[in-house]
Amino acid sequence: MKQLSLFISLCFFFSTSLLQAQESSGGSGGGGNGSDSYSSGSSGSSSGGGVGIVVSENYILKPSDVISIEVYQEVDLNKSARIQGDGSVALALIGKVKVAGMTAGEAQSLIIDLYNRDYLVDPQISLLVVEFSPKVIHILGSVNNPGVVSIPPDRDLTLTEAIASVRGVSRLGNPKSMTIKRVGEDGRARQMEVNFSRIIQDPNSKDIILKEGDTIWVPERII
């Protein structure tokens, strides 16, 4: 009986020690996770709330672009604003600033100079493009889904891609006799006759790069 009692006591002792070790390990692990979470949260808050689109400093700002201005350690001065038709944005303290026509880098430098001049000492300011000004073309006539097609902000749009986006030429359409109406920088409109069938069938035929404001007309076949 004494040996049995001793054996039970030893089992209880080792079980208790093991349980305490597990609790201690779990507690320290929980503390580590809490520290990591706090660190991530702190890092997220220090980076600011703006989520921008990565663009080159040479990207030229345009009316209707939406930009986000973030001033380090000056949360009240942070602002997202759409560039107005006159090319300006209204910012805290410094008022309206004309930025359209400038590169993103030039606009950022200008805003830093304006704040540094009268309000802040050596400010750290970032400018992010949150939304691009929409650039569109119009496709009309004998296509399956005529309407407006957006040009991607970061690359060109080809005629083939544009026709595909409206679900192709309809069965009554004439892909050999499309016209593209384009207004030049001088304000004059001109029309181009395009044989779309040749573009998609001839490997040596170059696709056409579309420009903002182009209007594509697809006529019906003459039966």
Image (cartoon, helix red, strand yellow):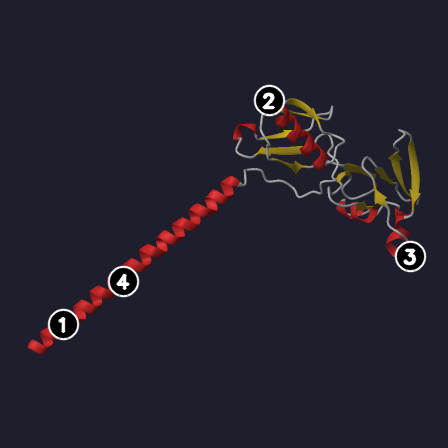
Label 3's element?
A: loop
Quadrant housing residue 72:
top right
How far apart are labels 4 and 3 at the CA level? 75 Å
Which residue is tagged 4? 21
How far apart are labels 2 and 4 at the CA level? 59 Å
Residue found at x 76% / y 31%: 101
Give the vertical position of 136 relative to 8 (above or below).
Answer: above
Label 1's element?
A: helix
How far apart are labels 1 and 2 at the CA level? 78 Å
How far apart are labels 1 and 4 at the CA level? 20 Å
Label 1 vs label 2, nearer the camera: 2
Q: Is residue 65 visible?
A: no
Residue found at x 70% / y 32%: 107
Which residue is tagged 3? 204
Label 1 neighbourhood size at 10 Å, few (<14), some (14-19), many (20+)?
few
Which residue is tagged 2? 93
Task: Say which amino acid is labelled 1.
Answer: Ile
Task: Say which amino acid is labelled 4.
Answer: Ala
